[in-house]
Image (spheres, grey):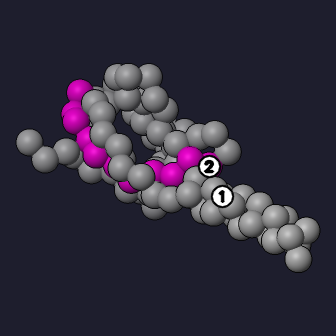
């Protein structure tokens, strides 16, 4: 019985870690540059945000503070929502 329990627990732990990595997180920063062609925003701290299809860049400008929701996908910051930060 012990031989079965340990691998099952290890598999459950690995699955929970995968789910934790896919969780949506909050971020904020100040826009340095915007690339409509690449659909990315670079923040002043150097982070590059890859915006999902359907996320609009039209209301954003360099120098603005923004808040965003993101997930880490393939080592990149994948943004599902971005907006001007509340003052």
* Foreground pick, 27 / 9: 9
Magenta stretch: includes residue 26: no
Q: Position of residue 52 (x, y in %)?
A: 51, 55
Furthest residue in direction left, as rendered: 87
Taking the spot 56% from the left edge, 47% from the top edge, the residue there is 72
Q: CA distance from mark 2 to mark 1?
A: 11 Å
Magenta stretch: includes residue 64: yes
Q: Position of residue 62 (x, y in %)?
A: 28, 29
Left-right relation of 37 to 7: left
Tag 2, which secondary structure? strand
| Residue 58 visible in rendering | no
Neighbourhood count class around disc 2 (C-alpha, 10 Å): few under 14, some 14–19, many 20 upward: few
Above or below 53: residue 37: above
Location of mark 2 (residue): 73
Q: Position of residue 35 (x, y in %)?
A: 46, 34
Taking the spot 52% from the left edge, 42% from the top edge, the residue there is 77
Q: Position of residue 36 (x, y in %)?
A: 46, 40
Q: Quadrant of the N terminus?
A: bottom right
Q: Quadrant of the C terminus?
A: top left
Q: Which residues are magenta?
A: 63-73
| Residue 28 visible in rendering | yes
* Foreground pick, 47 / 16: 16
What secondary structure characterizes most of the magenta part?
A: strand
Left-right relation of 33 to 12: left
Location of mark 1 (residue): 18
* Foreground pick, 16 / 65: 16
Taking the spot 42% from the left edge, 36% from the top edge, the residue there is 41
Residues under numbered marks 2 and 1 in contact, where contact means CB atoms less than 8 Å apart: no
């Amino acid at each position: 019985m012990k031989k079965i329990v340990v691998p099952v627990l290890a598999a459950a732990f690995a699955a929970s870690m995968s789910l934790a990595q896919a969780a949506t997180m909050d971020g904020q920063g100040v826009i340095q540059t915007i690339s409509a062609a690449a659909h990315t925003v670079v923040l002043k701290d150097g982070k590059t945000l890859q915006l999902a299809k359907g996320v609009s860049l039209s209301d954003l400008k360099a120098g603005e503070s923004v808040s965003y929701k993101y997930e880490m996908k393939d080592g990149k910051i994948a943004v599902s929502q971005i907006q001007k930060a509340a003052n």
